[in-house]
Amino acid sequence: MSALADRAAPQPARSRDRIAHVGLRVVEAGPVLILALVALVMSLLSPFFLTERNLTNLGFQTSIVAVLALGQLLVILTRGIDLSVGSVVALAGVLGVMAGDSGVVVVLTMALTGALVGAVNGLVLVKGRVMNPFIVTLGTLSIVRGAALVVSDAQTVSGLPPLVQTLGTDKVGPVPAPALLVAVLGALAYLLLARTQWGRWIYAVGGNPDAARRVGIPVDRVLISVYVLCGLAAGIAGLLVAGRTDAGAPAAGQLLELDAITAVIIGGASFFGGRGSVGNVIAGALIIGVIRNGLDLLDVSPFWQLIAIGVLVIVSLELDVLRGHLETGLRAAHARAAEA
């Protein structure tokens, strides 16, 4: 019936539908295309951009934001946000240094610190009935940062076991260990979102929470889980930061939450929930890293970096609006074809 309807449709209408389909695919691939364009421009402007040394530095610089962005994606998919992740980076680093000389114990301490803060965020939202993630995580941002300052007496604490330093600074061949960690976490996030029922539930909760409840999806447990995973990602990012500096600093991680959120938005995720992909979010983190790295190579003022990233955020939001219009137009075209 659909094929008959398509044949019956006027040729101009079918052409418009095909153009809309192509346009939608281009918009969906927008972050990857922007990344390729930015990398091409930087490679043309600086002969040092594509050198092995610079690409290795780029891998180290981008990995922390990428890890945070993967966790932030899960929260944003459910129409939430977590502003506390930068503070978690600091607290995880401080507590990790104080956990002793065992590398395994230190790693577990940092990871569990993040997961615990995430659990608190999720429980306050769900069980406390304070369904405003911006306000809740703004509060924990302050509490966790204060805890890091209190525990460390506002002093940077140095001395970490070799395992942590390896994760933060070593390479496997030419590839930075943090970049490999990002690849592993990205693969796990993709499997969660694309290959499990829990992942489908995350998208469903973000798309329409009330409808998700009506069909029996455990919305509260889904919400708590994404905040726990986001906190866990922040603890891992804290591990990378501490490993790079061989220290736990109560001032670490400041404004990293903004970088993570920016990477998710540049990666095409929607604050209205239910839309976003792992690959595009990693591309968003790389876009930020390439812009900063390239402009540093070109000796451009860091103030211009802020302007460039801000412009990209606005462009990404406009692409999201365009995608919405294209999807609406295609749905209307399909409905007309079905009625014909």
Image: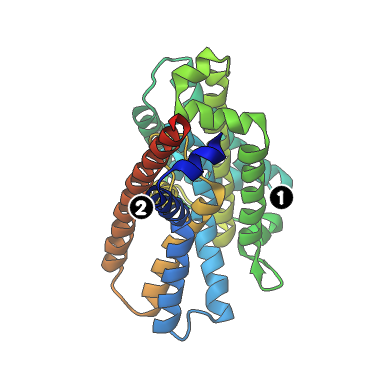
The structure residue drawn at horizontal position 52% and vertical position 28%, both measured from the top left corner, is 204
The part of the image, by quadrant, that contains residue 108 is: top right
Q: Secondary structure at mark 1?
A: helix
Q: Quadrant of the N terminus?
A: top right
Q: Amino acid at mark 2?
A: Ser
The structure residue drawn at horizontal position 53% and vertical position 43%, both measured from the top left corner, is 234
Q: Quadrant of the C terminus?
A: top left
Q: Is residue 140 above or below residue 47?
A: above
**Image position, residue 337 (x, y; %):** 45, 36
- The residue lying toward the viewer, choosing from 141 and 337, is 337
- Give the residue number, with chain letter if any, for mark 1: 103
Q: Amino acid at mark 1?
A: Gly
Query: Mark 1, residues whose alpha carbon is within 10 Å: few (<14), some, or many (≥20)?
Result: some
Query: Mark 2, residues whose alpha carbon is within 10 Å: few (<14), some, or many (≥20)?
Result: many
Q: Nearer the viewer, mark 1 or mark 2?
A: 2
**Image position, residue 262 (x, y; %):** 39, 50
- Give the residue number, with chain letter if any, for mark 2: 316
Q: Is residue 15 visible?
A: yes
Q: Secondary structure at mark 2?
A: helix
